[in-house]
Amino acid sequence: MFDLEENRKKVQSALLIGIQHPKMTRQESEYLLAELAELTRNLDIPIVGEMIIKLRKPTPAFLVGKGKLEEIISIIQEQKIDVIIFDEELSPAQQRNWERESKIAVIDRQEVIIDIFSERAQTKEAVLQVALARMQYSLPRLTRAWTHLSRQRGGGTGARGQGETQLEADRRMINDRIAITKKELKEVIKHRHVQRSKRIRRPVPTISIVGYTNAGKSSLLNKLTQSDALAEDKLFATLDPTTRRLDLDKSQHVLLTDTVGFVRRLPHRLVDAFKATLEEAVVADLLIHLVDVSNPEFESHFETTESVLAEIGATENPRLLVFNKIDNFGDEGTLSRIKLLHKDALYISAATGEGLEALKEDISTVLNAKLAPSRIVIPHDRYDIISKLHCSGGIRHQETEDDGVHIEGLFPESVQGIIAPFIVSQ
């Protein structure tokens, strides 16, 4: 496998190739190629050319036909290009064939995304998950690294040369590393499940922000919670889930989590790898589906996120559809038409703060709809219960009387068993 991370500084010029399949519009293929360009620039790889190939039927050997193969090779020779990046998954055989014909590195969207994930992962679990994805991707492509030894095989049928022996040794080594990494991951995931179960038992509602990458999820988290989680204008700026406390009013608070962003054609092995952050969405009491409404492809971004949420079993969670970056929208007429089509959505700007108070009110409304209003009297010697009720963020009124502490509030199911003996009315 071409080690993109190791060789990135050597790469001075890249040619990006998009594929327009029969059912795709030209505009869709252009947007996908623009997304690949942004991914590539995030790795500081200079782009010297882009082209879109209209493909009727893929070929097993090179994906594209012989004519396009010759045209591309002519371009890379003329412009002295270092690497070709396809916006399409290439099979191991197709990559080997391309590298043999072009004499340069040929990679695909998957390798670019894996490299970004490798660079940005922070937690132990994320680092292990990316390492596993990289090894699983590399294993069937090992022969790319050893084609220069093919001349040393010699002998008759069944003879084993140096290259073949090295290849087998590398396969065994990677398989061993995959097994070890899976074992480590099992322990890390087990620990995370324990931590999450403790969090679930806490009587505090949880909210997850989900959406397409670069929709502004980290910016929204920072603005709502006055925190400083990493928020950059780039794809996959953050990969690990970040949780902060959000105070909805003086008596109610929740836990707000920013999750990894989605992207079209995200390698499936990386969707599996990042179940850690996606699971935060599955167990959340509420999802905020954040969409960058200023992006011309926002409808496709919405559909991509919804399809992944369905894949991980998060379709039953209550959710709010929130359109972000309205401050980037210069055309008020177009924005008005979008608002007519999506009347139930909220329209905000995480950058300026516009619409955030309305968002907090809607969060309270959705969460409170699931809570049971109660009037209770807690004895003076049971301040441990009062402390738990304060943690739940559900107390609306509290007053100390001779017979105990009189409390009115909206309390989740997790504390109903605790307060049941003390309920005056419900």
Image (cartoon, rainbow, N blue to C red):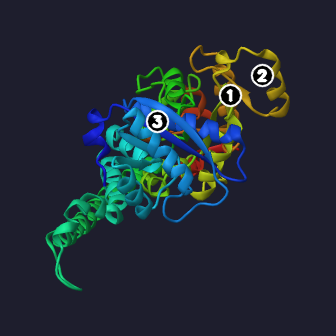
- Percent x, y for residue 316? 67, 54
* Left or right of residue 7: residue 373: right
Numbered tag placed on residue 293 in the rendering: 1
Mark 3: few/some/many CA within 10 Å (<14, 14-19, 20+): some
* Left or right of residue 193: residue 317: right
Task: Check the image and report above or below for 127 versus 295.
Answer: below
Whether label 1 touches label 2, CB < 8 Å: yes
Q: Which circle, 2 or 3, is nearer the viewer?
A: 3
- Percent x, y for residue 327? 65, 15
Q: From the image, tell me which residue sits under label 3.
A: 39
* Callout 3 secondary element: helix
* Callout 1 secondary element: loop
Going by the numbered disc 3, the residue's amino acid type is Leu
Task: Check the image and report above or below for 288 versus 247.
Answer: below
Q: From the image, tell me which residue sits under label 2.
A: 335
Inter-mark Cα distance, 2 to 3: 28 Å
Q: Residue at x 52, y 21 (%)?
A: 223
Going by the numbered disc 1, the residue's amino acid type is Val
Looking at the image, the residue that sits furthest to the left is 162
Going by the numbered disc 2, the residue's amino acid type is Leu
Q: Which circle, 1 or 3, is nearer the viewer?
A: 3
- Percent x, y for residue 363? 65, 33
Q: Residue at x 67, y 25 (%)?
A: 294
